[in-house]
Image (cartoon, helix red, strand yellow):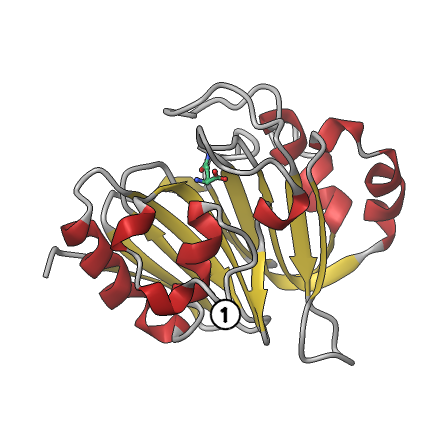
């Protein structure tokens, strides 16, 4: 299982979100606290962020462990954004080990990360041509990014088609965050400056709360909304 994180709020640096928290994605790349599947997240990482002059986000991914990225460690304090989405990867057995298989996956304004696994046979054939990789998460992303606002419906459909699927998905478009819990952990930290969604809390702030399983989370500047996801 990978670990992912997104931020929506006042401008915040990549260093403050990913690297500086005691149990942030940097630490989670070698010592996650709540991981249920896999042990370390050393098969790559990725981060995307939005800036006012561009509709589409910037994206930086690598197949190396996050702790080995000296250039990111140097650049991250200098890059701040109101919306950030990032992930560290623990590759599912049999999946490719290159940059194109690392989240976030992109289409237009949207970025997507998947924490879990899904049988690629249940994904529509039409999703394959636009997939960035043959990795299950990339084919899933290709299908979900056809209609990001149908996230809840599509996750329910897949959950019914593949009962072993784990479908914790995280999306952002610069103005909102969407996330599902389906088989793994997710926590939310809402503060006056903004909202963090993360596979696990990056520190021991008592304001973190755990999202129950099978829920759709929507974060906008107006706040955080949770809706149950039931099988169709
Ligand atoms: N199945 C995806 C991959 O192989 C995600 C794995 C995960 O969540 N650990 O990259």
Mark 1, secondary structure of its residue = loop
Instruction: Name which residue lies at 52% across and 43% down.
Output: 4
Residue linked to disc 1: 176
Left or right? Give the position of 73 relative to 92.
Answer: right
Left or right? Give the position of 148 relative to 133.
Answer: left
Which x, y percent locates residue 68? 79, 28
Instruction: Name which residue lies at 67% across and 45% down.
Output: 99
Which x, y percent locates residue 178? 42, 62
Residue positioned most to the left: 232
Left or right? Give the position of 71 relative to 111.
Answer: right
- Which of 67 and 212 lies nearest the eye of the viewer? 67
Q: Residues within 10 Å of mark 1 (few under 14, many from 20)?
A: many
Instruction: Name which residue lies at 32% across and 44% down.
Output: 118
Which x, y percent locates residue 229? 19, 57
- Which of 104 and 221 lies nearest the eye of the viewer? 104
Q: How many marks?
A: 1
- Give residue 31's quadrant in the image: top right
The quadrant the N terminus occupies is top left
The quadrant the C terminus occupies is bottom left
Q: Taking 216 as reference, is 206 above or below it?
A: above
Which x, y percent locates residue 138? 49, 53
Specify whether residue 228 is in view: no
- Give residue 96's quadrant in the image: top right
Instruction: Name which residue lies at 77% across and 58% down.
Output: 80
Specify whether residue 218 is in view: yes
- Give residue 111's quadrant in the image: bottom right
Q: Taking 93 as reference, is 61 above or below it?
A: below
Q: Taking 209 as reference, is 221 above or below it?
A: below
Q: Ligand 1 within 8 A of label 1's CB?
A: no
């Amino acid at each position: 299982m990978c670990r992912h994180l997104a931020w929506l709020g006042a401008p915040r640096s990549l260093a403050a979100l990913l690297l500086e928290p005691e149990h942030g994605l940097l630490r989670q790349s070698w010592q996650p606290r709540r991981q249920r599947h896999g042990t370390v997240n050393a098969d790559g990482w990725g981060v995307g962020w939005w800036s006012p002059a561009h509709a589409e986000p910037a994206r930086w991914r690598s197949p190396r462990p996050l702790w080995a990225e000296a250039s990111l460690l140097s650049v991250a304090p200098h890059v701040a954004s109101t919306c950030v989405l990032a992930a560290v990867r623990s590759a599912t057995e049999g999946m490719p080990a290159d940059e194109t298989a690392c989240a976030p996956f992109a289409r237009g304004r949207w970025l997507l990360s998947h924490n879990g696994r899904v049988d690629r046979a249940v994904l529509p054939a039409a999703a394959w041509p636009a997939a960035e990789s043959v990795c299950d998460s990339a084919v899933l992303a290709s299908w979900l990014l056809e209609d990001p606002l149908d996230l809840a419906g599509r996750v329910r459909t897949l959950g019914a088609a593949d009962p072993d699927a784990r479908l914790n998905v995280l999306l952002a478009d610069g103005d909102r965050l969407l996330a599902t819990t389906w088989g793994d952990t997710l926590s939310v930290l809402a503060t006056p400056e903004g909202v963090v969604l993360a596979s696990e809390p990056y520190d021991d702030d008592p304001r973190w709360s755990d999202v129950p399983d099978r829920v759709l989370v929507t974060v906008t500047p107006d706040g955080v909304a949770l809706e149950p996801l039931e099988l169709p």
